[in-house]
Image: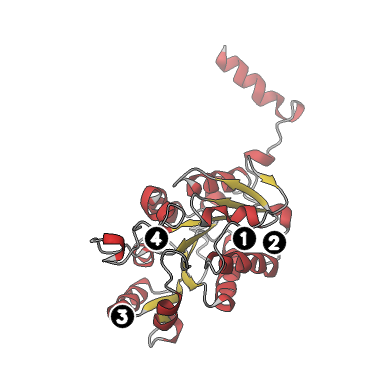
Amino acid sequence: MVQSVKPVASTWCPGCGDFGVLAAVKKAVAEAGVPVHEEVLVGGIGCSGGIHNFIETNGIHALHGRLLAQAVGIKLSNPGLTVIAAGGDGDGYAIGMGHFMHAFKKNVSLLYIVMNNETYGLTKGQASPTSRIGYEGNIEHPFDAILTALSIPVPNFIARTFSGDPKTMIQVLVEAIKFNRANHGFAFVEDLSPCVTYNDTFKDWRARVVDVATLPGYNPADRQTMFRLCVETMQAGKIPIGVMHRPAAPDPSSPGLELKLLPDKIGPARADIGLESNRVAYEKLLRTAA
């Protein structure tokens, strides 16, 4: 059940990168002008998935790997809501991978934030889909969500941030939320959010992050260029961050899924189900059923 409750004290370890995301979400929502009653925060499973408990908002704790499915359902039930889904790399890129891939194709106007710490922090530091080779015996190459997102040709918003740079994170989240509220489609932001207990990468990542906007040829409207820039940056041992993709201009023929299905922006949650206004339809339904 979606409900608005008073926030509780955080259960995160002191210094966790998720604190940066929590603060950035609070400030971004305020700067984007989102009324509290129009915001819903869907939390996943894992340390990061508890974020909705630590902020005064309408929140729901989703099933493991299914937060995107539930977030899509909320948005389609009431397109007037600003829906933010937030979870971790294990939740989103392992059990939730199917929903992750289809979220780009569906292009529903909601924001998905993945707090990537390259480990399963809540269950004591096992290797996750994004863990580097050698971490806790991991022998597999890490999954890169940005390259995957760029490979799906839909006019989405795609970005990566770093908890060590909260100012830039707020700017990116504000842009993403405004993108959603204009019904332009799906916004995905991966945040590099170190786990200080089991995989403290703050120092390493701070030395390696590179804002793609500073690179020659940067053009977030050109997927091919951005894919090349990201690959070249990674091959140089750096980590690309910043806005990776945004449409050059809104495509009126390809709005968010909610406008394709519900052009009047009235979803089931706000539909008029009164007897008199729907009597003809109800009587027709009864005759058909009979």
Please determine whether, in this image, residue 279 is positioned above or below residue 146: above
Q: CA distance from mark 1 to mark 3?
A: 36 Å
Sequence order check: which comes first, mark 2 or mark 3? 2
Secondary structure of residue under mark 1: helix
Q: Position of residue 235 (x, y in %)?
A: 27, 79
Q: CA gap, disc 4 to disc 2?
A: 32 Å
Q: Nearer the viewer, residue 106 or 259?
A: 106
Q: Amino acid at mark 4?
A: Thr
**Left or right position of 209 against 36:** left
Mark 3 belongs to which amino acid?
A: Gly
The answer to which of marks 4 and 2 sits earlier in the sequence is 2
Residue density around tag 2, few if under 14, some if 14–19, many if 20 or more, within 10 Å = some
> Height in image: 58 above or below 193?
above
Q: Residue 260: x and y, percent? A: 53, 49
Q: Which residue is mark 1?
A: 181
Question: Between disc 4 and disc 1, whose residue precedes?
Answer: 4
**First-in-chain label (1 vs 3):** 1
Residue at the disc numbered 2: 34
Q: Secondary structure at mark 3?
A: loop
Could you tell me how far apart the alpha carbons at marks 2 and 3 are, in whole angstroms?
38 Å
C-alpha span from label 4 to label 3:
20 Å
Q: Quadrant of the N terminus?
A: top right
Quick one: label 4, few (<14), some, or many (20+) residues within 10 Å? many
